[in-house]
């Protein structure tokens, strides 16, 4: 392991750079830099040489050409153990460059700007940066390449421990990350330019358009203990946005499991459906209780009433900061995970007595697409976001639902969307009463939803995620005590189903919208 003597630093994201550069300089490493990076280091009184001093050429063409020079790439790419390489660089006065610290123009941020001009998009395509990264990564035996500020501390500490050297293992890991960085960068460029028309206008991404080539780039955040079952390995990946469940901040408790994370997503999504304080309790990707209330504490207690047995060991998601009154109620039950936008200090202090309970802060993230892996490929669809309007709702029975029934029906309809099909949800206004989930038969879902109910079913309403193929499902719902039903309609036997509802004195709304969840 040879000592690192010379490093090039050229970064767009300058997070942590000053401290890192100072530690490099303190180790006697000569620093060479470009443009704004050199100015920042110089202003911070860190010794630095301009790239033009190395190359003998000024930075030119509005910054397009800075590092594209043999004295840069020769110094990075020559193999130190190859006598011919050593002789060639000596003949041409090329000095070795042992470390490259580069991150790239913020192309993705530029591409996401509303109304961005094509010229601005093009000028934010980095050329010199990816070239240096790839050169250094290719020659990883001799050169360390650092593309992320998150690596600065670990690299500086290793250099300090080893008198300015880095292990081959470290350099290989950095090279792997470097190639992943340039691959993701090129993918982002290709995806953005794909939507540019031949007149070089940059339209905003269409919500209903799917790319011809689907390019995915996610960073591994860590290995999980196991997958759905102990014999399955698993890991989690992030899109780097800082938003959503994959980027949530765990503030307490043991490591999240694969199943915890899947349930957490379900609980979080359901809670976000409502503007009122809302609480979802989820078990095995299905809500076992959901409610809204004047406070999160009230919403939780109402959700728990739906099925307190199944809630044991459940995952809770709320859409408000979690305070002490809510924490006091949740503290009474064994729960695996609680997700909230924020936890007040009093709540954290109370939960601190339950060391294994995971507390997770989540920042809401918009869902655009849902992906499912199939053998040989992927399925891609839009998220199921289809709010109902008055135009959608159609009363098909002789009896119209009351105002109270209508409010309860619309509440149940939102919840039903988050229950695995076939799904039947019994509810009162603002509170689920019985949930029949994931059944092969809709009539069985109606029976199970009623069977699961711990609260009185008389006077409830019911939501069905898809149409009733036969009247028997409606008959079961009426037998349970519900007085009104909301469903998509569209069955060949709709008239028989409506006739059954009329015979049983039920009110029924058709939405024309289906909410299958597989």
Image (spheres, rainbow, N blue to C red):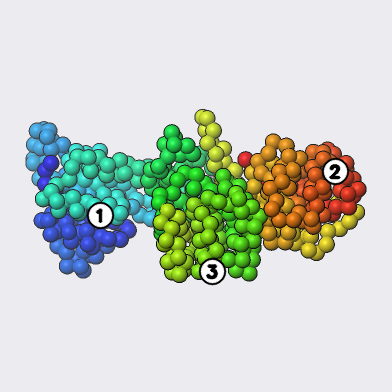
CA separation, marks 3 and 2? 45 Å
Measured as percent of width and height from the top left, residue 229 is found at 47, 37
Where is residue 313 shown, x and y percent of the image? 53, 50
**Is 466 or 118 nearer to us in this picture?**
466
Q: What residue is pinned by disc 2? A: 497
Q: Nearer the viewer, residue 72 or 439?
A: 439
So how many labels did they put on this image?
A: 3
Identify whether 373 is placed above or below 18.
above
Mark 1 touches mark 3? (CB < 8 Å): no
Marks 1, 3: nearer the viewer: 3
Taking the spot 16% from the left edge, 56% from the top edge, the residue there is: 24
How far apart are the two marked residues, 1 and 2, measured between alpha carbons?
Answer: 66 Å
The disc, 1 or 3, on the residue closer to the chain's N-terminal end is: 1
- Judging by the rendered image, the residue that carries numbered circle 3 is 325
Please tell me how crowded label 3 is: few (under 14), some (14-19), or many (20+) other residues with Cα within 10 Å. Answer: some
Q: Answer whether residue 466 is visible to the viewer in this image.
A: no
- CB-based contact (under 8 Å), mark 1 and mark 2: no
Structural distance between the alpha carbons of marks 1 and 3: 42 Å
The reply, left or right, for residue 98 in relation to residue 462 is: left
Q: Which residue is mark 1?
A: 152
Sequence-wise first label, 3 or 2: 3
Closer to the observer: label 1 or label 2?
2
Residue 60 placement, left or right of 318: left
Q: Quadrant of residue 183?
A: top left
10 Å crowding of disc 1: few (<14), some (14-19), many (20+): some
Dot 2 falls on a residue whose secondary structure is helix
Residue 496: give x, y in percent of width and height: 88, 41
Position of residue 191 measured from the top left corner of the image (x, y, whole percent) = 47, 45
For mark 3, give the secondary structure.
helix
Location of the N terminus by quadrant is top left
Along the horizontal axis of the image, is 449 left or right of 314?
right
Nearer mark to the viewer, of 3 and 2: 3
């Amino acid at each position: 392991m040879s000592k690192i003597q010379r490093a090039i630093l050229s970064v767009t994201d300058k997070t942590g750079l000053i401290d890192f550069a100072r530690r490099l300089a303190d180790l006697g490493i000569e620093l060479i830099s470009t443009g704004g990076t050199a100015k920042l280091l110089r202003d911070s009184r860190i010794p630095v040489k301009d790239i033009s001093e190395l190359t003998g050429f000024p930075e030119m063409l509005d910054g397009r050409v800075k590092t594209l020079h043999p004295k840069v790439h020769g110094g990075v790419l020559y193999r130190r153990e190859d006598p011919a390489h050593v002789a060639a660089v000596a003949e041409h006065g090329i000095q070795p460059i042992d470390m490259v610290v580069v991150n790239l123009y913020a192309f993705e941020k530029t591409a996401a700007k509303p109304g961005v001009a094509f010229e601005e998009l093009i000028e934010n395509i980095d050329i010199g940066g990816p070239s240096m990264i790839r050169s250094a990564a290719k020659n990883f035996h001799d050169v360390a390449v650092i593309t992320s500020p998150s690596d600065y501390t670990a690299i500086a500490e290793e250099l300090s421990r080893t008198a300015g050297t880095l292990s081959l293992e470290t350099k290989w890991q950095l090279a792997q990350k470097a190639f992943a960085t340039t691959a993701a960068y090129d993918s982002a460029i290709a995806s953005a330019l794909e939507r540019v028309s031949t007149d070089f206008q940059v339209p905003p991404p269409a919500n209903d358009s799917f790319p011809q080539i689907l390019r995915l780039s996610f960073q591994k955040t860590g290995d999980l203990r196991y997958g759905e079952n102990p014999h399955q390995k698993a890991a989690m990946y992030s899109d780097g946005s800082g938003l959503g469940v994959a980027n949530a901040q765990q503030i307490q408790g043991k490591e999240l499991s694969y199943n915890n994370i899947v349930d957490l997503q379900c609980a979080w999504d359901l809670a976000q459906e409502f503007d009122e304080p809302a609480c979802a309790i989820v078990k095995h990707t299905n809500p076992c209780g959901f409610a809204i209330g004047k406070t999160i504490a009230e919403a939780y207690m109402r959700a728990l009433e739906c099925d307190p047995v199944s809630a044991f060991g459940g995952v809770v998601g709320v859409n408000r900061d979690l305070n002490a009154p809510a924490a006091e109620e949740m503290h009474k039950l064994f729960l695996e995970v609680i997700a909230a936008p924020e936890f007040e200090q009093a709540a954290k202090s109370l939960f601190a007595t339950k060391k294994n309970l995971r507390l997770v802060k989540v920042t809401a993230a918009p869902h655009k697409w849902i992906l499912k892996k199939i053998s040989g490929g992927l399925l891609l669809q839009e998220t199921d976001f289809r709010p109902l309007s008055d135009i959608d709702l159609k009363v098909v029975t002789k009896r119209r639902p009351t105002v109270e029934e209508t409010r309860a029906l619309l509440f149940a309809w939102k919840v039903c969307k988050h229950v695995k099909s076939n799904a039947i949800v019994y509810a009162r206004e603002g509170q689920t009463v019985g949930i029949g989930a994931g059944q092969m038969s809709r009539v069985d879902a109606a029976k199970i939803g009623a069977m699961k109910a711990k609260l009185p079913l008389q006077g409830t309403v019911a939501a069905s995620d898809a149409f009733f193929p036969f009247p028997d499902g409606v008959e079961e719902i009426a037998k349970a005590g519900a007085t009104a039903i909301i469903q998509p309609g569209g069955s060949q036997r709709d008239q028989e189903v409506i006739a059954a509802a009329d015979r049983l004195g039920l009110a029924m709304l058709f939405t024309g919208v289906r909410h299958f969840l597989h």
